[in-house]
Image: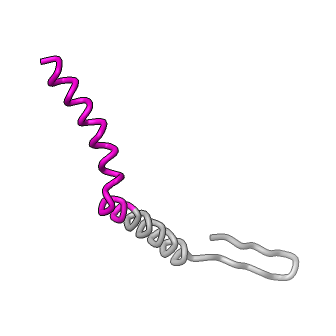
Amino acid sequence: MAEVGRTHTTTHKNRGALIMSDPKNLVIALLLIGVAVLGYLYYESQQTHVRIDVPGFKLEAK
């Protein structure tokens, strides 16, 4: 029984290394990060901006 537990923890540690070393998983992770960044940039571009510029007073806000 002890050997089974030891083997299980060893394979569990190796499985974590295999997930990031698999090229397909790495590409998927990079694509997800890219989509998240582009989504954030799009969200920021759609936010309304307020700008008031009159003599003696200037206000800019997002």
Which of the 4 quarters of the picture holds residue 9? top left
Q: Main secondary structure of the magenta part?
A: helix
Q: Residue at x 54, y 77 (%)?
A: 45
Residue at the extreme top: 2
| Residue 35 counted in the magenta span | no
Residue at the extreme left: 1
Q: Judge by depth and name the residue closer to the eye, 44 or 25.
A: 25
Which of the 4 quarters of the picture holds residue 24? bottom left
Q: Position of residue 18 (x, y in %)?
A: 30, 48
Q: Position of residue 27 (x, y in %)?
A: 36, 65
The stretch of residues the image draws in magenta is 1-29
Q: Judge by depth and name the residue closer to the eye, 45 or 55.
A: 45
Q: Residue at x 38, y 64 (%)?
A: 32
Q: Residue at x 70, y 78 (%)?
A: 51
| Residue 24 counted in the magenta span | yes
Question: Relative to 27, does residue 7 appear above or below in the rendering?
Answer: above
The N terminus sits in image quarter? top left
Q: Is residue 56 left or right of residue 35?
A: right
Q: Is residue 4 left or right of residue 34?
A: left
Q: Position of residue 33 (x, y in %)?
A: 43, 63
Which of the 4 quarters of the picture holds residue 34? bottom left
Q: Residue at x 79, y 75 (%)?
A: 58
The C terminus sits in image quarter? bottom right
Residue at the extreme right: 56
Q: Is residue 28 left or right of residue 4?
A: right
How many labels sit on residues? 0
Question: Relative to 19, does residue 48 appear above or below in the rendering?
Answer: below
